[in-house]
Amino acid sequence: MDIDTLFGLPAHPLIVHAAVVLLPIAAIGLIVVAAIPRARRLYAPIVLGLALAATVAVGLAQQSGESLEDDVKETELVEEHAEQGETVLPWAIAVMVMSALVAAEPHVRDRFDKPSPRVVTAVLVGASLIVGLGATYTVIDV
């Protein structure tokens, strides 16, 4: 399924705005809910929803970009942008998976009381920082 136009306009620039806004917001939200255990139960599901929406937006932006690439003059800059654009989806998926893990943590912790809450928070914050900063940097770079 090719996504060429929305409302008579090229789809790619419109969809890219959703991806460029949603993914960094989800990444920042992920880092915040990972770092603040009291916020996890209430806000982590919202962050997970944002991450899911961002991942869908990134996938649609990638598809619409491939459609647009066929319609524009092939230049080195267009080729470089297309190649860089392919690197965003794995980061979006990582933010989504990490958001799911952070959202599940309070429920898992209620069932198993073995790991120290500080250790769990440290691991979640470390992994969330890597994923969140990597995703945000990649979006800016592309």
Image (cartoon, rainbow, N blue to C red):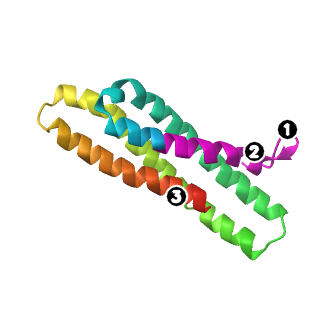
**Where is residue 109 drawn, in percent x and y?**
21, 30
Relative to 75, say whether 42 is above or below: above
**Where is residue 111 drawn, in percent x and y?**
18, 27
Q: Is the magenta stretch mostly helix, strand or loop?
A: helix
Distance from disc 1 to disc 2, alpha carbons, whole Å, reads 10 Å
Q: Do the residues labelled 1 and 2 touch (CB within 8 Å)?
A: yes
Amino acid beneath label 1? Phe
Q: Earlier in the sequence, mark 3 or mark 1?
A: 1
Mark whose residue sits in front, 3 or 1: 3
Q: Which of marks 3 and 2 is nearer the N terminus?
A: 2
**Where is residue 23 drawn, in percent x and y?**
55, 45
Relative to 114, say whether 66 is above or below: below
Identify the magenta region: 1-27
Residue 72 in which image quadrant: bottom right
Q: Is mark 1 on a helix, strand or loop?
A: loop
Neighbourhood count class around disc 3 (C-alpha, 10 Å): few under 14, some 14–19, many 20 upward:
some
Mark whose residue sits in front, 3 or 2: 3
Q: Name the residue under label 2.
A: 14
Q: Mark 3 points at which residue?
A: 137
Amino acid beneath label 3? Tyr
Residue at the image position 45 percent from the left and 54 percent from the top: 133
Relative to 129, say whether 84 is above or below: below
Q: Do the residues labelled 3 and 2 touch (CB within 8 Å)?
A: no
Amino acid beneath label 2? Leu
Q: Can I make out residue 2 in this image?
A: no
Q: Mark 1 points at which residue?
A: 7
Neighbourhood count class around disc 1 (C-alpha, 10 Å): few under 14, some 14–19, many 20 upward:
few
